[in-house]
Image: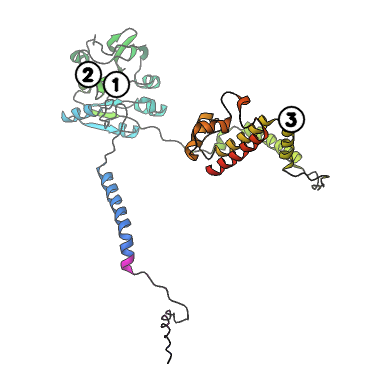
Amino acid sequence: MSTTTAPPPPPPPAATAPGGGSTSTSVGVGTLWRRARGPLAFLGAIVVLAVLLSLGAQTTRSGPLEPDNPGTDGSRALIEILRDRGTGVTVARDTDTALAATHRGSLLVVASSHRLLPEELDRLSAAPGDLLLVLPTTAALRELAPGVRTGGGTDDRTLLPGCDLPAAAAAGSADTGGELYTVTGDGAVGCYPAEGGDALVQVARDGGMTTVLGSADPLTNGRLDRQGNAALALNLAGDRDVVWFLPEVPAAGQRKDVWELLPRSFGMAVAPLALTLLLLAVWRGRRLGPLVAERLPVVVRAAETTEGRARLYAARRARDRAGAALRSGLIGRVRPALGLGADAAPEAVVEAVAVRGGDEPGRLRTLLYGPTSGPEDDPYTADDPGLVRLADELDRLEERLR
């Protein structure tokens, strides 16, 4: 009685969609959350760190005589001292704000006058109260300090008052060396003299007094505690309200296209030039007719040049030139694979080949470049069998280096 083995049960049929197609396994929400929570947590940490850094960062202005600048060339220390003394200090960044804050009992400190336009200087000339000009421009002197002219400069930083002006006489020596001025007119006073003029001058004008200071050092944080700088700055301010006018850089006007900045003559010159180039392109690019296919009288195989050269070598028994051609061909092919340039020295090539192929460097030197004593001692070019042996060994070496 024979028995048969029952076949294994068939696999269960794949689930089908109502339309007859197979259904795909969908990814659950929990799986998606487990995959995305790591990147989301990383991005959230970066956002929180950026927010904290932005909240903790404080932007401060910088620049000479900047009232918010704590650096050596700023004037924040002087501003804070004036406020601690009860002096009202107004920082103005434009002419309208400066004029609105001035009155007959105020002192308007004008710094960076090179940023002021002529019409702004004209408006400041009618401002009530006193003026303190720090390193003014020639235009500012002409409008705001009548009778004051530039007299040169001095290399001496510290100068003595040399005048009876109470603010300078009480302060004593100060770091006022820099620009010098000459002043004419009734009631004009010059202090801190040097060769060529005075570093501090005072002259009357309509509506008040104008003081011109040729150095910003007495007002800066880095020099305020030296010599009589602090005393001079505070004495010039007195017990008046101070308007510290540091104009902003003038805003750029209406932007113009680059073509609007070019003169009309440029367009008149470019038009004929462009027309000339177009005619030249048409002339040089004209078609001379269709290409004519011409059959060659003889078909030359690409290998014939090599074979002909080999026959010339054989006819002239130029085994040395044939060996040099074989060697240079191999070296040129393997040098890029060894990471060497075209100007690599023979010693570098031999060393690289020895490391890669495991051969003895002395033997490789003779195989690749011939003996050092000269081509007459080359065993590979002494006879035809030696030249054949050279070709075979070079082939085997190239196979190992691949």
Q: Quadrant of residue 250?
A: top left
Determine whether 340 is above or below 290 in the image.
Answer: above
Task: Please state which of the two labelled residues, at mark 3 or mark 1, is closer to the viewer.
Answer: 3
Q: Amino acid at mark 1?
A: Ala
The label on residue 316 is 3
Q: Nearer the viewer, residue 234 or 279?
A: 279
Q: Amino acid at mark 3?
A: Arg
Q: Tell me which numbered mark, 1 or 2, is placed earlier along the sequence.
A: 1
Q: Tell me which numbered mark, 3 or 1, is placed earlier along the sequence.
A: 1
Relative side of 335 to 386, left or right: left
- Describe the element under mark 2 as helix, strand or loop: helix
Q: Quadrant of residue 27?
A: bottom left
Can you identify the residue that label 1 sits on? 216
The reply to whether callout 2 and callout 3 are in contact (CB within 8 Å) is no
- Describe the element under mark 1 as helix, strand or loop: loop
Q: CA distance from mark 3 to mark 1?
A: 92 Å
Instruction: Evaluate whether residue 254 shows in this view.
Output: no
Which region of the structure is painted magenta? 4-31
Q: Nearer the viewer, residue 137 or 33?
A: 33
The quarter in which the N terminus is drawn is bottom left
Q: Amino acid at mark 2?
A: Asn
Q: Position of residue 47 (x, y in %)?
A: 30, 51
Residue under the image location 51 percent in, 36 percent down: 353
Determine whether 315 is above or below 31 in the image.
Answer: above
